[in-house]
Amino acid sequence: MIVDIPGATLADEERAGASVVLYYGLSVLVAYDALDRALKEFRAGRDGNQVRGYRERVKEFEEFMGYREFAERARSQRRRAP
């Protein structure tokens, strides 16, 4: 297992013997880019609801994160609490 190597392709990393490659660097840069663009748009319009491509994806994100199951477990634990 390795962390992605800047400038290397997945094929390069596999040839180097990696069977698992953590694309940490790529993931962080992609997240930074999205956050940077969204904050610039927010600063310009001063309305988070007008930042395109995000608020309409809340349900999709909650499904991806398993939010419904989490909320059900939390409610169940509250009912059992003394």
Image (cartoon, helix red, strand yellow):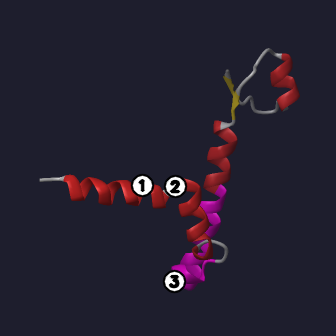
Which sits in the foreground, 30 or 79?
79
Which sits in the foreground, 49 or 69?
69
Q: CA distance from mark 2 to mark 3?
A: 30 Å
Q: Residue furthest left?
A: 82
| Type of the residue with mark 2 | Gly
Q: Which residues are magenta?
A: 33-51
Image location of residue 55, percent across then percent down: 57, 75
Q: Secondary structure at mark 3?
A: loop
Image location of residue 7, percent across then percent down: 81, 33
| Type of the residue with mark 1 | Phe
Magenta stretch: includes residue 47? yes
**Magenta-highlighted stretch: main secondary structure?**
helix
Residue that carries the numbered disc 1 in the rendered image: 70
Which sits in the foreground, 64 or 47?
64
Q: Earlier in the sequence, mark 2 or mark 3?
A: 3
Q: Secondary structure at mark 2?
A: loop
What residue do we see at 83% from left, 22% from top?
14
In this rendering, position of residue 72 left or right of residue 58? left
| Type of the residue with mark 3 | Arg
Image location of residue 11, percent across then percent down: 88, 27
Which sits in the foreground, 28 or 20?
20
Q: CA distance from mark 3 to mark 1?
A: 32 Å
Residue that carries the numbered disc 2 in the rendered image: 66
Image location of residue 35, percent across then percent down: 59, 61
Residue that carries the numbered disc 3 in the rendered image: 46
- The image quadrant of residue 25 is top right
Asked if residue 1 is positioned above or below residue 48 in the image, the reply reads above
- The image quadrant of residue 76 is bottom left
